[in-house]
Image: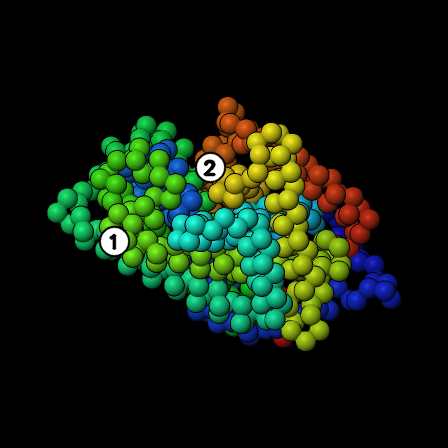
């Protein structure tokens, strides 16, 4: 337990902690729900994740998605309960920090920031990479993908600086396009194969390798939902966040679960329930769309483009709020906690977040060249960086689930419910251990075998930094979560 003490008065050179506020009331329930689903990026996540999932879990990969959806719903309960009691732009940082003290808050801030920056770098890369793939497929162009990445990222940053309302709505429009295309193509594929439909994808006996295959495919399925927590960090700019954040979380998880099961069933059906053929395809869904009706492939490519752009905008919007709030509360450097003077958007946090993600892409590519692997492929990079980022993010999910029972017993004792505030989060914590184990288990190929050690290194550095910062600024604990999102 961190000892309580009085925070030192800010110096004249620094603004009062919490002095910068985001523009409240800019977003409604539909806005944050659509932003959350755009952050998940169902087309992007499904296109580049399902082939490997089918290889791992077999024909019954849709069943693995159902299990993952239930697990993510358990995590959603934790986020909804925290947001109902203490809505904050700090999200997980605030929830863990208010429960376990300032050292845990700073450690969580660094872990989640590192995880999200690495993960968003995968989206930044694939946005240009997928555009290159599309133009090469239809026109035979061979423009380097990194040029498209830089242009699209710059445009996205300008849009996000302009305002959370306009950027969130655009991300929502992008999501509407991709979701519509995914549903239409899936229904068309299923209808075409109507005479040969099978329930094999939902039968446990058809999971490749039985329970071990289900467990091994589980982290891949869970990854397709990453971004479900988007709405919590938008609480300060949301109408009635105590109610709307939880609603947006559950609605998004439910819609994505149903959608993914539909897309997965259509894909394995299109491949004649052959998991090997499904896994061998570069982008299985596009291959199925093309094999069903040529024009559907064009719309599938369009869905992929809108998905990467929507995920880039929605993910950066949400995740930079965590960075901003950590700077505002002095968990991280104070300049991160400043807003644009007129737009009220976290300008510095956006610039640092996106710049760091772009630099990681450059550094990763340099390592490929030094290692003799040649130029970096954006699809491979997407898989590698998203895996590394997911490990760090899962650690924060785990800590948040463990924190919920303690938080409600300490601060919301009168509202404590054994099922909602103890049983469900502890079951969720246990479920998170499964993907963590499979992402960190020995014997994986390089660079995946290095990721567990890198994650431990990040955790150790974050903890040491947190210990030193709290000793230097013992009043930090009083500032964690001090700004409640719906406070006047």
**Nearer to the camera, 249 or 262:** 262
Report the coloring of the rendering: rainbow
Judging by the rendered image, the residue that carries numbered circle 1 is 293
Residue under the point 66% across and 35% down: 457
Residue 369, can we see it?
Answer: yes
* Quadrant hosting residue 66: top left
Q: CA distance from mark 2 to mark 1?
A: 37 Å
- Which mark is on residue 435? 2
Mark 2 or mark 1: which comes first in sequence?
1
**Nearer to the camera, 189 or 166:** 189
In the image: residue 417, left or right of residue 356:
left
Counting from the top left corner in percent of width and height, residue 327 is at 71, 58
**Nearer to the camera, 236 or 415:** 236
Task: Locate the N terminus and report the quarter of the image it occupies.
Answer: top right
Label 2: which secondary element = helix
Residue under the point 36% across and 31% down: 213
* Quadrant hosting residue 62: top left
Say whether marks 2 and 1 touch (CB < 8 Å).
no
Counting from the top left corner in percent of width and height, residue 309 is at 49, 59
- Which mark is on residue 35? none
* Quadrant hosting residue 371: top right
Q: Residue furthest right?
A: 12
Tell me if mark 1 has few (under 14), some (14-19) or many (20+) residues whose alpha carbon lies within 10 angstroms of its own: some
Tell me if mark 2 has few (under 14), some (14-19) or many (20+) residues whose alpha carbon lies within 10 angstroms of its own: many
Task: Locate the C terminus and report the quarter of the image it occupies.
Answer: bottom right
In the image: residue 293, left or right of residue 150:
left
Q: Is residue 216 above or below residue 316?
A: above
Residue under the point 61% across and 45% down: 361
In the image: residue 126, left or right of residue 464:
left
Label 1: which secondary element = loop
In the image: residue 119, left or right of residue 430:
right
């Amino acid at each position: 337990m961190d000892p309580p003490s009085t925070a030192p008065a800010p110096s004249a050179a620094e603004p009062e902690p919490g002095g910068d506020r985001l523009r409240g009331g800019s977003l409604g329930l539909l806005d944050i729900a659509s932003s959350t689903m755009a952050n998940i990026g169902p087309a992007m996540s499904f296109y580049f994740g399902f082939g490997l999932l089918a290889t791992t879990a077999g024909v019954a990969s849709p069943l693995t998605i159902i299990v993952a959806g239930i697990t993510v719903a358990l995590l959603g309960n934790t986020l909804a309960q925290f947001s109902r009691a203490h809505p904050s732009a700090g999200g997980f940082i605030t929830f863990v920090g208010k429960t376990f003290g300032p050292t845990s808050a700073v450690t969580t801030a660094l872990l989640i920031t590192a995880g999200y920056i690495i993960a968003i770098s995968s989206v930044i890369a694939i946005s240009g990479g997928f555009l290159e793939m599309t133009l090469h497929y239809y026109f035979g162009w061979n423009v380097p993908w990194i040029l498209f990445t830089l242009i699209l990222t710059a445009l996205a940053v300008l849009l996000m600086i302009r305002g959370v309302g306009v950027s969130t709505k655009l991300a929502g429009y992008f999501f509407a396009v991709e979701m519509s295309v995914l549903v239409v193509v899936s229904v068309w594929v299923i209808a075409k194969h109507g005479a040969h439909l099978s329930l094999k994808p939902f039968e446990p006996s058809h999971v490749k390798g039985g329970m071990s295959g289900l467990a091994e495919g589980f982290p891949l399925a869970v990854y397709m939902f990453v971004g479900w927590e988007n709405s919590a960090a938008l609480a300060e700019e949301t109408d009635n966040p105590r109610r709307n954040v939880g609603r947006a979380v559950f609605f998004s998880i439910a819609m994505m679960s149903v959608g993914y099961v539909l897309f997965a069933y259509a894909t394995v059906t299109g491949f004649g329930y052959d998991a090997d053929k499904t896994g061998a395809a570069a982008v299985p869904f596009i291959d199925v769309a093309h094999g069903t009706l040529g024009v559907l492939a064009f719309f599938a490519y369009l869905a992929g483009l809108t998905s990467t752009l929507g995920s880039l905008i929605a993910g950066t919007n949400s995740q930079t709020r965590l960075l901003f709030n950590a700077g505002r509360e002095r968990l991280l450097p104070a300049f991160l906690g400043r807003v644009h003077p007129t737009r009220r958007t976290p300008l510095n946090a956006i610039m640092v977040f996106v710049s760091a993600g772009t630099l990681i892409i450059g550094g990763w590519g340099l390592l490929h060249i030094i290692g003799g692997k040649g130029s970096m492929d954006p699809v491979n990079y997407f898989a590698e960086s998203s895996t590394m980022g997911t490990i760090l993010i899962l650690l924060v999910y785990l800590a948040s689930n463990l924190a919920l029972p303690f938080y409600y017993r300490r601060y919301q004792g009168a509202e404590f419910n054994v099922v909602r505030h103890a049983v469900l989060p502890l079951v969720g914590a246990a479920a998170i251990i499964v993907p963590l184990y499979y992402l960190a288990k020995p014997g994986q190929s390089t660079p995946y075998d290095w990721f567990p050690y890198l994650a431990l290194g990040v955790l150790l550095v974050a903890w040491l930094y947190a210990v030193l910062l709290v000793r230097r600024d013992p009043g930090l604990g009083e500032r964690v979560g001090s700004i409640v999102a719906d406070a006047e």
